[in-house]
Image (tube, rainbow, N blue to C red):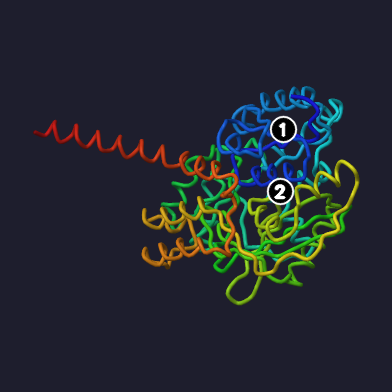
Amino acid sequence: MSGADVLVVGNESRTTLAAARSLSRNEIPFVVLSDRRGMLAASRYVRSHTVIPAPTVDRAGFARSLLDEVRRANAPLLVPTYDSALDVCNAHRDELREAGARLAAASADAVRNVLDKEANLETARRLGIPCPRQASIASLDEAPALAEELGFPVVLKRPSADASTSRFPKWSVARDTAELIACLDVYPGGGPFPLMQERLTGSIVGLYCFAVRGEIVAMFCSRAKRRAAGQNVLREIIPLDARLAEHARSLLRYLDWDGVAALAFFETGDRGVRYLETNGRLWGGLEGAIRAGWDVPSWVVRYFREGEAPRPGPIEVGSRCCWRFGDLAGLAAVFAGNAWLTDREHVGRMRAVGDYLSAFRPRIGSDVFRFDDPLPELVEHWDWILPALSRTVGRAKRSARQRIGRE
């Protein structure tokens, strides 16, 4: 393995797959790094794949392996595709630079700001960007009173997106004090504690940007038509919202941002908006942007390798794309009585099935499936189905043993 232009520091996700396919189509030599051989290794577009430790499990081992791969591949550019990888890469910028690699990301301070969700929300408030009502938990004992003050149900969010907090749930919902206490059981008595926010109702709108020294040179707007487990499953590109665009410009200018940024806003029923977070790397719905005309991964490489800022043409407003595995997981949550994990709480089972099937219409693209590269979709579903089958068989065996015992 030598002579790669890019190391894609990824995980087994649709984001990493979309980036790899883009680089392959643009004939940019690359190597994908992830923690196991799954959907990425199955893709015909991924010709070089290396397994390294996951930063969420072995942070130090991940950093060592990353430096080894930089030296071995002689790759001048690193493109992280998820927060934990971005966090560790950001912390080891100097060593990576000495090894000959540049991180395709904004400045170290700017990246730290968006990874620290509480600090980032405080920055947004100072800039006059509306945010959800929230409370910081100083001790577990005070959490019930804070929740009562905000009003149930409340949302508990992981305090930071860095690798050190990955053992905590990304988010959870507590509908009463008993559920709140159960959600907080995973947190140590001395912290760090989750961020507590009011639960909003409405729709998620994302602004997907490319900035050059704090000034946005490309931006489009997308609305989530369906969500599951905190992810935008079915999305539609919509006309740019002027209010949200101004908020994005304000924040990214303040951070002197370079490269890609995905800002999430909650649009409430009364047309009010609340800022949620910024992701400082390629986002989950990346394939939808590429399909609609903006080949963002190639922009990232050209900008950070050659200093060439994007000059985007028009993006296809009305274009829709769906993460089919996420959509199926959302449907399963509805049938399992866990609709709160989705935006389907007030939708019956038959309606949920109809909605799921409707996403297979010809004009709706797929984040993962391609006719010329079908295996990643199959592997992604199989990796979920196999453990579910194992659990089902295990329950059946236990039930049979119990019946035999009673007889």
Residue position for label 2:
282
Look at 25% across and 33% down and name the residue there. 397
Would you place residue 150 above or below residue 301 in this image? below
Percent of width and height locating residue 298:
78, 47
For this view, does 156 lie left or right of residue 19? left
Look at 52% across and 58% down and name the residue there. 154
Q: Residues within 10 Å of mark 2 (few under 14, many from 20)?
A: many
For this view, does 216 lie left or right of residue 187? right
Percent of width and height locating residue 208:
73, 58
State the quadrant of the N terminus. Answer: top right
Could you say whether the residue bearing mark 2 is in a helix, strand or loop?
loop
In the depicted view, which residue is nearer to us: 371 or 70?
A: 371
Could you say whether the residue bearing mark 1 is in a helix, strand or loop?
strand
Look at label 1 and name its amino acid. Answer: Val
Q: Which mark is residue 31?
A: 1
The answer to which of marks 1 and 2 sits earlier in the sequence is: 1
User: Please, which residue is most extreme toward the left here?
Assistant: 407
For this view, does 98 lie left or right of residue 318? right
In the picture, residue 139 is in which quadrant? top right
Q: Residues within 10 Å of mark 1 (few under 14, many from 20)?
A: many
Look at label 2 and name its amino acid. Answer: Leu
Percent of width and height locating residue 308:
90, 49
Look at 58% across and 74% down and name the residue there. 269
